[in-house]
Amino acid sequence: MKLKILEIGKMVPEFEPENIFVLFGQSAPPELREISVIIDFKKNDNVIYFREGSKLVISGKEYTITEVGDLANSNFHELGHLSVYLNKDIETLPGAVHAIPDEFPRFKVGDEIEIIY
């Protein structure tokens, strides 16, 4: 599945020291747009987007999912919303995933994010 980056919230770079980023579909409310990477999200048929070992490819850089929160797939399916932790010291919240390596992505409007199941 490929998702186009439509917008990068002005506060996204502020999360680089913590190695956290947030994806959100176009329905993101204004207060969350500022902290989110807005994507052109389309639902898949089976509601599963992420599992351990899945890949996220962001602007050519590959990340491997190492842990998936209980609500990560359903939140992503409904809203295109996902928090991604590239920091192993943060507890995985229900709507989040952990991924490696711990290198903050270089987001650019127009680039793609690919999810490899």
Image: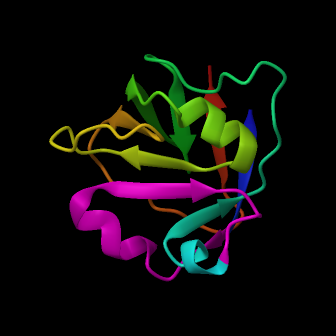
Residue at position x 26%, y 44% in the image: 102
Residue at position x 53%, y 35% in the image: 72
Q: Is residue 60 above or below residue 108?
A: above
- Report the residue that reaches farthest toward the left: 89
Scheme of image coloration: rainbow
Q: Position of residue 117 (x, y in %)?
A: 62, 19
Left or right of 90, for residue 34: right
Q: Is residue 2 above or below residue 109?
A: above
Q: Nearer the viewer, residue 45 or 107?
A: 45
Residue at position x 48%, y 41% in the image: 95
Residue 10 magenta: yes
Residue at position x 56%, y 72% in the image: 32
Q: Magenta segment range?
A: 7-29
Say how many tags the image has. Answer: 0
Q: Where on the picture, by quarter, is residue 21?
A: bottom left
Q: Position of residue 65 (x, y in %)?
A: 42, 27
Q: Nearer the viewer, residue 105 or 96?
A: 96
Q: Where on the picture, by quarter, is residue 36?
A: bottom right
Q: Position of residue 34 (x, y in %)?
A: 54, 79
Left or right of 51, for residue 45: right
Left or right of 105, for residue 114: right
Work out which quarter of the rendered image holds the N terminus and state it.
top right
Q: Nearer the viewer, residue 26 or 78?
A: 78
Q: Position of residue 15 (x, y in %)?
A: 32, 67
Q: Where on the picture, by quarter, is residue 98?
A: top left
Residue 13 magenta: yes
